[in-house]
């Protein structure tokens, strides 16, 4: 390359670099949804990874006695004792075998949901997800559907699952009240 060609090439690269800052930032999360394909109670579901803070297999769960059949017990996560609920039971399905997998829901208070099978991680274009508006009766944890290989799966909303657990236990999340 000659000196003028190099100068022109550098000017083009500099202009492209400067233009990249003038363009709106592209949001990876807005274009795609990261999901876990799972089975709970023999039925296929999907979970949003953005609503989870971890997935664990074969984590020991210490059983607890109590009136809630969905409560499997407690498990330790980074020094915290976390209640573990059977996702299949929360969804109203029989659960003949003890679930192997745990998903730790993001947010507070801590909550883990147990499910039977992890089918894999999938990344889908957000436009293929059929969303459901909020405004359910508070017991519905399903928010939308996503077409995946093998069929369409309902999406379990982890914050809604936390709300269902709160209803089952009679605890309401702490809300700051104005005075």
Image (cartoon, helix red, strand yellow):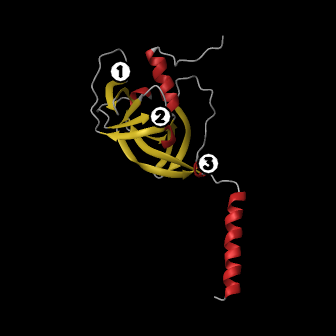
Task: Tell me whether circle 1 and circle 2 mark residues in contact (CB < 8 Å).
Answer: no
Q: Work out which residue is located at the far bottom of the displayed protein and give it.
A: 2
Which residue occupies 48% across, 43% down? 49
Disc 1 crowd rating (10 Å Cα; few below 14, some 14-19, many 20+) is few
Q: Can residue 114 be seen in this view?
A: yes
Residue that mark 1 sits on: 69
Q: Which quadrant holds the C terminus?
A: top right
Distance between the alpha carbons at the discs numbered 1 and 3: 38 Å
Q: Disc 3 or 2, which lies upstream in sequence?
A: 3
Q: Nearer the viewer, residue 39 or 28?
A: 28
Residue that mark 2 sits on: 106
Q: Work out which residue is located at the far front of the displayed protein and give it.
A: 3
Q: Residue 129's spot in the image, x, y percent?
A: 58, 45
Disc 3 crowd rating (10 Å Cα; few below 14, some 14-19, many 20+) is few
Which residue occupies 49% across, 23% down? 164
Q: Nearer the viewer, residue 164 or 18?
A: 18
* Above or below, comparing residue 102 to residue 23 in the picture: above
Which residue occupies 71% across, 69% down? 15
* Above or below, comparing residue 139 to residue 171 in the picture: below
Residue 40 marker: none
Q: Disc 1 or 2, which lies upstream in sequence?
A: 1
Distance between the alpha carbons at the discs numbered 3 and 2: 19 Å
How many numbered discs sit on the rendered protein?
3
Residue 30 marker: 3
Q: Residue 108's spot in the image, x, y percent?
A: 48, 27
Q: Disc 1 or 3, which lies upstream in sequence?
A: 3
Q: Residue 10's spot in the image, x, y percent?
A: 67, 76
Q: Residue 138's spot in the image, x, y percent?
A: 55, 23
Task: Tell me whether circle 3 and circle 2 mark residues in contact (CB < 8 Å).
Answer: no
Which is more foreground, mark 1 or mark 3? 3
Q: Can residue 43 be seen in this view?
A: no
Q: Which quadrant holds the N terminus?
A: bottom right
């Amino acid at each position: 390359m000659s000196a003028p060609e190099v100068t022109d090439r550098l000017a083009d690269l500099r202009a492209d670099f400067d233009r990249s800052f003038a363009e709106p930032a592209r949001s990876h999360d807005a274009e795609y949804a990261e999901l876990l394909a799972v089975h709970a109670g023999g039925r296929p579901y999907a979970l949003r990874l953005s609503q989870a803070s971890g997935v664990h297999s074969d984590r020991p769960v210490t059983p607890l006695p109590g009136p809630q059949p969905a409560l499997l017990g407690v498990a330790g996560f980074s020094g915290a004792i976390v209640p573990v609920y059977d996702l299949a039971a929360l969804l109203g399905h029989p659960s003949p075998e003890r679930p192997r997998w745990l998903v730790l829901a993001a947010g507070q208070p801590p909550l883990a949901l147990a499910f039977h099978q992890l089918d894999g991680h999938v990344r889908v274009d957000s436009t293929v997800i059929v969303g459901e508006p909020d405004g359910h009766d508070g017991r519905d944890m399903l928010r939308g559907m996503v077409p995946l290989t093998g069929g369409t799966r309902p999406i379990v909303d982890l914050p809604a699952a936390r709300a269902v657990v709160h209803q089952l236990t009679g605890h309401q999340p702490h809300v700051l009240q104005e005075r």
